[in-house]
Image: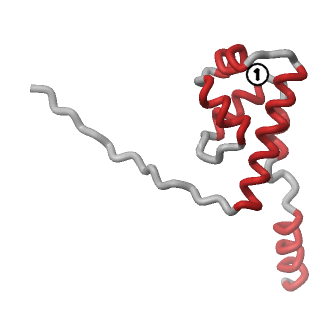
Amino acid sequence: MVNKQHKRVNTKKQIMFPKYQKVLEQVGEHIKLARKRRKLTTMQVSERAGIDRSTLYQIEKGNGSVSMAAYFNTLRVLGLQDDFLKLAADDAFGRKLQDLSLLKSK
């Protein structure tokens, strides 16, 4: 008899406020335009990125439930992987907080 253990996967749905959902939709639109500028089909990009075509469709729609890895691999196929490094790179608020704490300590 084979003992099968099933792990419960956390499938908590992420909640996106409309104004932030629009940001993801813009990212998806940028990805779609980049694909079309390169004259690549959804089939070509999805195969090269190792994702289903339906996942690419969700990425191009700005779906927030798609993994970051799928977004990254899609950008990689389009030659835009370095754009991923721009995420959270300019932490102006964090620097201001750090500067304030540095000014307070003597």
12 left or right, relative to 45: left
- Considering every residue shown, the one lying at the far left of the view is 1
77 left or right, relative to 15: right
Total tally of numbered discs in the picture: 1
Q: Amino acid at mark 1?
A: Val
| Residue that carries the numbered disc 1 in the rendered image | 77
Q: Quadrant of residue 46?
A: top right
Question: Where residue 35 sits: x, y (%)?
Answer: 82, 24
At mark 1, the secondary structure is helix
The residue positioned 75% from the left and 48% from the top of the image is 24
The residue positioned 80% from the left and 33% from the top of the image is 31
Q: Quadrant of residue 78?
A: top right
The residue positioned 81% from the left and 38% from the top of the image is 29
Question: Where residue 4 sits: x, y (%)?
Answer: 21, 33
Which quadrant is the C terminus positioned in? Answer: bottom right
The residue positioned 65% from the left and 16% from the top of the image is 47
Which quadrant is the N terminus positioned in? Answer: top left
